[in-house]
Amino acid sequence: GQQLNQSPQSMFIQEGEDVSMNCTSSSIFNTWLWYKQDPGEGPVLLIALYKAGELTSNGRLTAQFGITRKDSFLNISASIPSDVGIYFCAGQLGNTPLVFGKGTRLSVIA
Amino acid sequence: DADVTQTPRNRITKTGKRIMLECSQTKGHDRMYWYRQDPGLGLRLIYYSFDVKDINKGEISDGYSVSRQAQAKFSLSLESAIPNQTALYFCATRPAGGNTDTQYFGPGTRLTVL
């Protein structure tokens, strides 16, 4: 089945550093979503993007819908220990089910 | 109360047993989904349903079946469990159409097949 290429697979960063992760696809989407999964929990929506070129922020998180509609990135500024978790991107075209990336596992060293 | 609930949260079973995982939602969403999560593989779609009379296969439906008993309930069955079905299973719901087309997940069921 179709999958998104999400990178990096894992990251170890110092508290206070900025983080950047991205997703790319060979096909276009008209919705991009970013989720975070805490240990033992289901993914929780962070940011939804609906328009090519759109840049949206949610606190220290910023995400962009790529202009080609084939990519998206998520930035986290000034990381803190509670940012630890797995981050997933997801894309959707029309009424089709969401397609998920394989996730980026973020570890924050205090 | 949680909007999307899953039962059980954890289950250990033996090869060949029939298992049912249940999902209920209070969000009033039409669309419901079952995913499995394996380390390093992300979320893979098993089955999905757009309403009570609608069932669709996802990417990895073999070995699974589903039942949409009501708008609020969507259950996943493993007719004869096998060890490689050991995984974390998530139910999700989504509203139909509009710009609120985002998906909400339950807390997950950890299934171990021995």
Image: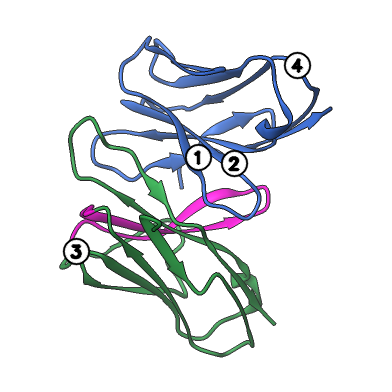
Q: Which stretch appears magenta?
A: B28-51
- Going 48% across and 41% down the picture, which residue do you hit? A44
- The secondary structure type at the circle numbered 1 is loop
| Mark closest to the chain's N terminus, 2 or 4 | 4
Q: Which chain is green?
A: B
Taking the magenta stretch, the answer to whether it contains residue A75 is: no
Residue A102 has which mark? 2
- Going 68% across and 34% down the picture, which residue do you hit? A82
Q: Amino acid at mark 2?
A: Lys
Q: Quadrant of residue A106?
A: top right
- Going 45% across and 84% down the picture, which residue do you hit? B79
Frontmost of labels 1 and 2 is 2
Residue topped by disc 3:
B54
- Per the model, the C-alpha gap separating discs 1 and 2 is 8 Å
Residue topped by disc 4:
A16
Q: How many marks?
A: 4
Query: Within 10 angstroms of label 1, few (less than 14), some, or many (20 or more) residues?
Result: some
Q: Colour of chain A?
A: blue
- Per the model, the C-alpha gap separating discs 3 and 2 is 28 Å
Q: Chain of mark 4?
A: A
Query: Within 10 angstroms of label 2, few (less than 14), some, or many (20 or more) residues?
Result: many
Is the C-beta separation of discs 4 and 3 under 8 Å? no
- Going 84% across and 27% down the picture, which residue do you hit? A110
| Mark closest to the chain's N terminus, 1 or 4 | 1
Depth check, front residue: A104 or A97: A104
Residue topped by disc 1:
A3
- Per the model, the C-alpha gap separating discs 2 and 4 is 25 Å
